[in-house]
Image (cartoon, helix red, strand yellow):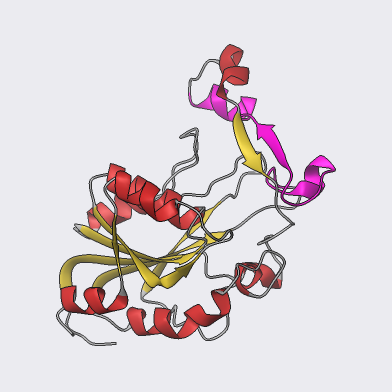
Amino acid sequence: MTDKVIHGTALLIVDMQVDFVTGSLAVPGATVLLDPINEIIDLPFAYRVASKDFHPPGHISFASTHGKQPFDNTTIYPPEDLVRRTGGDVEKIKERGLGQTLWPDHCVQGTPGVEFIPGLKVDGKFDIVLKGTHLGVECYSAFKDPWHLLPTDLEDNLHRHNVKEVYLVGVAGDFCVKATAIDAAKAGFNTFVVTDGVRSVFEGGKEYEEMKAMGVEIIDLVELKRRMQVA
């Protein structure tokens, strides 16, 4: 890792955790990401941050919580206590339901699956963002949940470090990477997803088209190195 940095740039590693790579919710092909992501980590970013799913037992996204099978679907609603706390209208909670894919239990606080994968060069130079920490709130994006009840400190930290460009890698491309990239673009950051460092749960999806439609640029490692002036 060089001492030289490209000012205004940030690397955001999304959810490169044991359960998403080799564990209970392993993303197909994610095991090949370690080397390219470590290579990307060594590029001269001014700021580095990594997100973690950090769920309590019995989280709303777990199929076991609902007595259903993994990959079944259900509808979830914002928790009444959070709606009240944020000044929302509890009478309209049922109007704010969202479709939810249910997952195997994963990234549970205090379990090995919540840790970053062995060998990932996430060190003290990285800030860590925890998401999905509330029992009743799913949170794909590292910025905020879909109801905007529990924003993380990611956006504030990016501004505090004078970040203009955010480069994303990690898993899963069709869920947490996509949601985080779109929120980064909405927040006004020039946002790039580096395909060499991303894998998705489902093949043949339209996540890259959806991200591009929201202003996210899709690039490869060669282009990233060119932009970081190390090609």
Q: Position of residue 189 (x, y in %)?
A: 23, 51
Q: Residue furthest right?
A: 67
Question: Split into 4 quadrants, where in the image is the C terminus?
Answer: bottom left
Look at the picture and state if 171 lies above or below 29: above
Q: Position of residue 150 (x, y in %)?
A: 49, 40
Answer whether residue 163 is magenta in the image: no
Q: Position of residue 229 (x, y in %)?
A: 14, 80
Query: Which residue is depicted at the point 36% across and 85% down?
Result: 39
Look at the picture and state if 26 lies above or below 154: below
Question: Split into 4 quadrants, where in the image is the N terminus?
Answer: bottom left
Answer whether residue 72 is magenta in the image: yes
Q: Residue furthest top?
A: 91
Give the camera-side residue of 131 and 103.
103
Query: Which residue is depicted at the point 49% across and 37% down?
Result: 146
Q: Position of residue 91 (x, y in %)?
A: 60, 12
Give the magenta range.
59-86
Look at the picture and state if 141 lies above or below 169: above
Quarter-of-image position of residue 188: top left
Query: Which residue is depicted at the point 58% across and 18% down?
Result: 95
Residue 186 relative to residue 23: left or right: left
Residue 119 relative to residue 73: left or right: left
Look at the picture and state if 142 lies above or below 25: above
Give the camera-side residue of 216 and 158.
216
